[in-house]
Image (cartoon, rainbow, N blue to C red):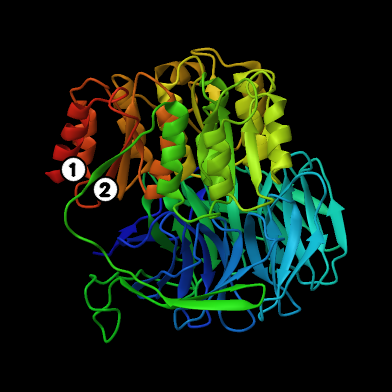
Amino acid sequence: MAAWTVRSPVAAGETAVGVVSTCTDPSISDPYGIAAGPDGALWFTNNTNNSIGRITTDGVVTNFTGAGISGPTDIATGSDGALWFTNGGNNSIGRIGTDGVVSNFVDPSIAAPRAIVAGSDGALWFINYDTKTIGRITTGGAVSQYPGPGAGLPQAMAAGPDSALWFTVGGSNDSIGRITTTGAVSSYTSAAIASPQGITSGPDGAMWFDITGYSGSIGRITTGGDVSAYEGSGGGWRIAAGPDGALWFTEGGAIGRITTDGTRSSSGLPSGSSALFGIVAGSDGAMWFTASGTNSIGRITTGVSTGSVNCPVAGGGGGGGGGGSTTGGSSTTTTGGTTTGGTTTGGTTLGPKPVTRLAGADRIATAVAVSPASFPDARSAGAVVLARSDNFADALAGTPLAAAKSGPLLLNPPFGGLDGRVETEIARVLPPGGTVWVLGGAAALSTIVDAQLQADGYRVARVAGRDRYATAVAVAHQGLGDPPTVLEATGLNFPDALAGGAAAAKAHAAVLLTAGVVMPTSTAAYLGAHPGDTRYALGGPAAAADPSATSIVGADRYGTATAVANGFFSAPTAIGAASGTTFPDALAGGANAVRAGGPLLLVDPSGPLPASVQAYIADNATSLAEGWLYGGASAVGDDVLAELQQAMSR
């Protein structure tokens, strides 16, 4: 059933503005990008259930599935009247007509695409995140590639009033980039440009952008390159021009607004709504946004719009006033000029809620067994994350990286080359030329691994710091592009960070580590450089290390894991479970759990099932459809598996 909730505005550090409504529906799962369609509806990507959603301004939700939709992120309306979107899961560009027909375009140059936008030349332009290049695709499917900013990580893109495309760059080269439709690239730097994220064209003829690393500021750059910044509270993520002549942006747990003279205001959202991403002006004069943390689509009035809408009860098939959530569409995939077709399927399956054990003969084999559960199709992963198998230290930050890159997390021995089983799985799941992210320095995984991967035709991206704390910072910066939300957990033990990894993946956040109750220098430096970040401290040690963060603490490791699940996963469709006394199986399992639509919970390997886990399953019985248990019977006993199955069946 779909339902709207109308909330009065709540002050969040500035003057309150707007009336917020949120719509939930079973088909909405980890929504990310959102665009105003030519049909007057809002179209959005469902990242974890591989579908495209549509919601009318009176609240009717439709869900479209199709072959080739894999980990969709950003979406934009093209000059041909269709919606175009980036597929991070299979390195492709998708197209869906307003009739629901899906096409998919594959090209070797497309590498972790994101941030798609219509250009003044009638083509769609996008960012290739892994290769730091700019892509272009015509409405006929012809793909071109242009050099990007060189250093740094391109983040978001928007069409400018000067007929060029403007984009933000984070990482080692914080800047604003510009590319003409002929491929000429310019770059603008300023002390005020620190970890920029979203960007849009403003009503004043300038480009406006979110700055997560400069006190949660909003930046402005003229087409001549003059930069100014308006300081505020909270780090922004995406920004869009509103019908009221102001700029609207998503930040932390609020929707922000800034006028062209720099006056800021905001409207608070309910607890759990911290993962806000896309935002766009709707045909009804309101701003619409995606809320991944609550699996919902939000709407906020602007002054041009009034009131709220009611989301009809599902079951009417989507037409003739019946309303509700429907499914539909057909699809084609285009690769090198060859088109193959098929028919999509959709709907909700009711019945038993199975709990499946994923296990191998050892921890390496278990990780290899988990990978096909997330990526059953050959060469369907966007990347692979590789961590050492004997120690948790460098791998604790790996789960959100694996999710962000749409790939599995595999384990390998620290000495020598690739384990044969790992090499075989990489060859199965990753396309030639794909990227393998190697966590830790040469002491964690030998450089022989790099050489072997390169010989096999893959690109190697090694992420390492001088210790576990610096490695986690490197993952946040180099791998994730300094996201505006961080989850902190102790790095002296693994349980809290393991549960936090899946939550961070859900929230598109990073995991940073504390040295127990002490804040390490590298973590403190990162937080100091990003004061606008939303911070959560998971578990007692991290909460003591950072008292100013929002703390999530349970009575024990199991209680903390379920508290994290409650905080970040609203209406989960699945749960993952792993031993709370050993780390390897949970490392691989966390990425699988969040891709399946749920949290990673920790269990006592010999039982009984923790009361907090039983309560979480009971509280979410209506949305849960399946469970996963990671590791063999020696890791988690069959009695615990039986208890999980019983709890899921109630």
Residue picked out by circle 1: 648
- Type of amino acid at the residue the image marks with label 1: Met
User: What's the distance in space between the residues labelled 2 and 1, CA to CA?
Assistant: 8 Å
426 over 584 or under it: above or below: below
Viewer-nearest residue: 561 or 131: 131
User: Where is residue 332 shown, x and y percent of the image?
Assistant: 51, 76
| Residue 236 visible here | yes
Q: In the displayed structure, does residue 31 sit left or right of residue 179?
A: left
Q: How many other residues sit within 10 Å of disc 1, few (<14), some (14-19) or many (≥20)?
A: many
Residue picked out by circle 2: 626
237 over 278 or under it: above or below: above
Q: Which residue is drawn at 45% across and 83% down?
A: 99
Q: Residue at x 21, y 73 (%)?
A: 315
- Type of amino acid at the residue the image marks with label 2: Glu
Viewer-nearest residue: 24 or 251: 24
Q: What element carries label 1?
A: helix
Residue with the most extreme left position = 650
User: Where is residue 313 shown, x and y percent of the image?
Assistant: 23, 70
